[in-house]
Image (cartoon, rainbow, N blue to C red):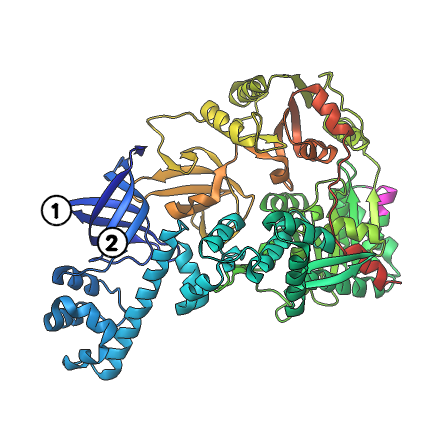
Amino acid sequence: MAEQHTEIIELSGTVRALIFQNADNGYTVLRLDAKEIEHIVVGCMPAISPGEQLLVRGHWVNHPTYGTQLQADYTERTLPSEEVAILAYLSSGAIKGVGAATAKQLVRAFGAETLSVIEETPERLAQIKGITPKRAQDISRAFLAQSGIRRLLDFLTQYDLPLPLALHLHRRYGEAALPALKENPYLLSDEEFQVDFSTVDTLAIQLGLEADAPERVEASLLFELSYNAGNGHSFLPRPKLVDATLSLIGVDWDTVEEGLDALIERGEVVCSPVAKVDACYLSWLYAAECYVTERICQMTQFPLPALPNLDALLQDAQKTQGICYAPEQQVAVKTAASSRIMLLTGGPGTGKTTTVRGILTLFDALGLKTVLAAPTGRAAKRLGEVCGREAVTIHRLLEATFGPDTRQTVFSKNETDPLSADAVIIDETSMVDLPLFQSLLRAMPFDCRLILVGDPDQLPSVGPGNVLSDLRRSQAVPEVLLTEIFRQSLQSAIVRNAHAVNRGETPDLTNQNQDFFFLRRRDPERVVETIAQLCQTRLPQNMGIPTSQIQVLSPTRRYATGTEHLNLCLQAAVNPKSREKQERKFGKHIFREGDRVMQIRNNYDLLWTSTNGGQAGVGVFNGDVGHITSIIPGEDVVIVNFDDRLVEYTADLLGELEPAYAMTVHKSQGSEYRAVILAVSQGAPMLLSRSILYTAITRAKELFIMVGDDAVVSHMAENYRHGKRYSGLRWRISQKNT
């Protein structure tokens, strides 16, 4: 395994050869000749070529296969000035249209002046046999383009900005990237570049932008709207938006109002009334809310004709499943038969799964082509298993990809290429945000039916909007709420306690149950120690539940019982350091063979292959959990198995992984685990809530254990904190229907 040293090393020399280079993100492995001693240097060095002069600062890493390497943290590059180095540079293919043979001709003709000639007097290149005046100009333009990237890299280095930005900026703005960045550094605050606003703001001030400059004010307003969209808000009331921006950048109220009016005039922000509020939206979120409103109202205004043989079809469905539906379930199946859109809601043990199978059986009898989907991979897998047919994530259903220019999500399925389906059933609808719901509706044919299934008491979506709640509260969409808890479910303390928590009652902590336990540990260190023991020995040895089927949850990432500290302790307990296991350090994480890991952002370009080699595909999504099967030191590759899909992570992609022995309750949404352990101790007040506790309990299939402070458990059950979300969907639907 690689051993890292902390001493800062500086080397200066000539790039002799590239061993590996990722054109998308600039991650490079190269040979550097420093005072006639050759070193291997690794790091982000976009568009670098042999022959260039390189100054690098970093630290040594002892690689188990390739020996000592310098991990570059900082680089400075200069073009070669000596003939040998210029020849190597031109021969490397760094300049389009110049190969090894042409490079020799150029250096033979112009010597150390070659690069100056190419840049400043390209017409002289035509003196060489075989180079026409047009080709001479093409070579010069290619060199100037390369110089543009170099100057952009120098600028990013000067201001300590991530070097991969050079590739993203050049892809977006071409040769105008650097001038555009200098003119308005706030373009980096666009979501595609993923640069913190504080970093961008600091850069802008360093470049001399005035504190009240329109660019700064407008960028701050857009940042506040984007930031709050990430917290679930579709809009902000105008006074709150202005006030938040004032606090962020410290200018006067009138200046912010002027900036907001300018954004509204250009259409980047839309100000629209919602009830008695002046609601300020990002334009794309306003469009999404209006589109969803129109489609929902269309679907509810044109109900389907009644089926004369519905009772007979219902009887056939019950025979097919070998059960007798409860009255509420019969109502649900009948409602699905006559509705273009329907909500099927209910808590654990109320028979949602049985009802979905009944609806599916009815649709089959009607000859409808039905597709099943859910927001996450685990939820889709579970839906497919209980229904006995394929289910996919909504992103896969809509054929999500990355836009080549913006690197944002693009769905291939839309109005021009709709889904081939007569009905769509979506599970775990509480997790679906407004933009994703818009994309789903855009891909559905006009006469397609939609069944939305979910638990109304689960946590809302991470993204903007409150779709399931808004649809329910609008009372425009037919809903069947399942309330009867079936006898077999009542035998489960998990189900009983989940419903108790939902009523605001403290769950039964007497430990007289077979599937629900509480272990009192009021010291946070003892909480972590006990959880580690449960995962390492107690549950595997005493209850036959392997560690791989235990999921530890926490309301928070921070504090002593947050997921960050828990993951460190659990890794040490269940997958300790070993000579037989390869490791790879990346940032604050040490990834080890056998580790459980989670993908933390959508990546539509990641290639996967099935474990049996029979299938291949692309795309790994936020929340997907797998385990590291191997780390290949020679290739610096980490291989992760996601439910029998193998994915290779090169060093530049490791930032998309994090340990998953413990995860937040929010991240566990849509998943179900054989055993769940919840840490209940310290946490932010807004996270110690009833909905967090309820969601955690309902993730457990066979066993649920809480470890921590009983006073915190009681507080969570009583704390009916529903963070207010600014959404206009319910109001717009209600207005449309009046």
Front-most of residues 475 and 265: 265
Identify which amino acid the numbered label 1 is placed on: Glu
Question: In the shown orientation, is residue 319 left or right of residue 40?
Answer: right
Q: Is residue 474 visible?
A: yes
Mark 1 or 2: the one toward you: 1
Q: Position of residue 701 (x, y in %)?
A: 66, 32
Identify which amino acid the numbered label 2 is placed on: Leu
The outermost residue toward the bottom is: 133
Q: Position of residue 361 (x, y in %)?
A: 75, 52
Front-most of residues 615 and 675: 675
Mark 2 packing: few (<14 Cα in 10 Å), some, or many (20+)?
A: some
Task: Looking at the image, tell me whether mark 1 or mark 2 is earlier in sequence order.
Answer: 2
246 inside magenta stretch: no
Look at the image and tell me in which quarter the N terminus lies: top left
Question: In the shown orientation, is residue 578 left or right of residue 276?
Answer: left
Front-most of residues 721 and 595: 721
Look at the image and tell me in which quarter the C terminus lies: bottom right
Magenta stretch bounds: 324-330
Q: Which residue is mark 2?
A: 18
Query: Dot 2: what SS?
Result: strand
Which residue: 60% across, 43% down?
Answer: 378
Q: Which mark is residue 36?
A: 1
Which residue: 67% across, 43% down?
Answer: 386
Q: Quadrant of residue 629?
A: top left
